[in-house]
């Protein structure tokens, strides 16, 4: 199956669902068994689906705590580039700009994910 941009959109929608629910099954469904999750490009990745789920839950945001918007900057050959905007409804509120590089396998699961995030002043 040739992956299309709609597969990336589905993945980002599922990522957002997992972000809001913090349900381990929702989180696990995003990743291949041996996926690498780079929470920052300058850190060692979290490797493996179970490790990613555990790491995610250690720093999970509360449901409803964030607003998230995104646009796909490009997609081809299973590699997607996504620009995002995250707003935290906390006190004090916070706003972040995000850039994601997502590598999907033929089933639409991520085998590599790298994110850059920058807090707005």
Image (spheres, rainbow, N blue to C red):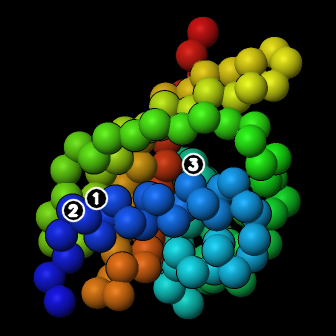
Marks 1 and 2: which is nearer the front? 2
Q: Earlier in the sequence, mark 1 or mark 3?
A: 3
Would residue 104 be found to the left or right of residue 53 on screen?
left
* Mark pair 3, 2: CA separation: 24 Å
Q: Quadrant of the N terminus?
A: bottom left
Helix, strand or loop under label 1: strand
Disc 2 crowd rating (10 Å Cα; few below 14, some 14-19, many 20+) is: some
Instruction: Name the mark on residue 40.
Output: 3
Which residue is at the far front?
64
Instruction: Name the mark on residue 5.
Output: 2
Disc 3 crowd rating (10 Å Cα; few below 14, some 14-19, many 20+) is: few
Tags 1 and 2 touching, CB below 8 Å: yes
Query: What residue lies at 84% left-to-right and 60% top-to-bottom?
Result: 58
Marks 1 and 3: which is nearer the front? 1
Query: What residue lies at 64% left-to-right and 74% top-to-bottom?
Result: 26
Instruction: Name the mark on residue 80.
Output: 1
Disc 1 crowd rating (10 Å Cα; few below 14, some 14-19, many 20+) is: many
């Amino acid at each position: 199956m040739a992956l299309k941009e709609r597969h990336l959109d589905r993945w980002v929608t599922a990522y957002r669902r997992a972000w809001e629910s913090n349900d381990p099954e929702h989180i696990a469904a995003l990743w291949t068994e041996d996926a690498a999750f780079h929470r920052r490009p300058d850190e060692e990745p979290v490797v493996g689906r179970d490790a990613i789920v555990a790491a995610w839950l250690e720093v999970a945001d509360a449901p409803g705590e964030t607003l998230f918007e995104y646009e796909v900057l490009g997609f081809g050959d299973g590699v997607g580039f996504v620009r995002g905007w995250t707003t935290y409804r906390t006190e004090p509120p916070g706003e972040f700009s995000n850039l994601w590089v997502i590598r999907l396998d033929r089933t639409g699961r991520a085998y590599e994910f790298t994110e850059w995030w920058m807090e707005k002043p």
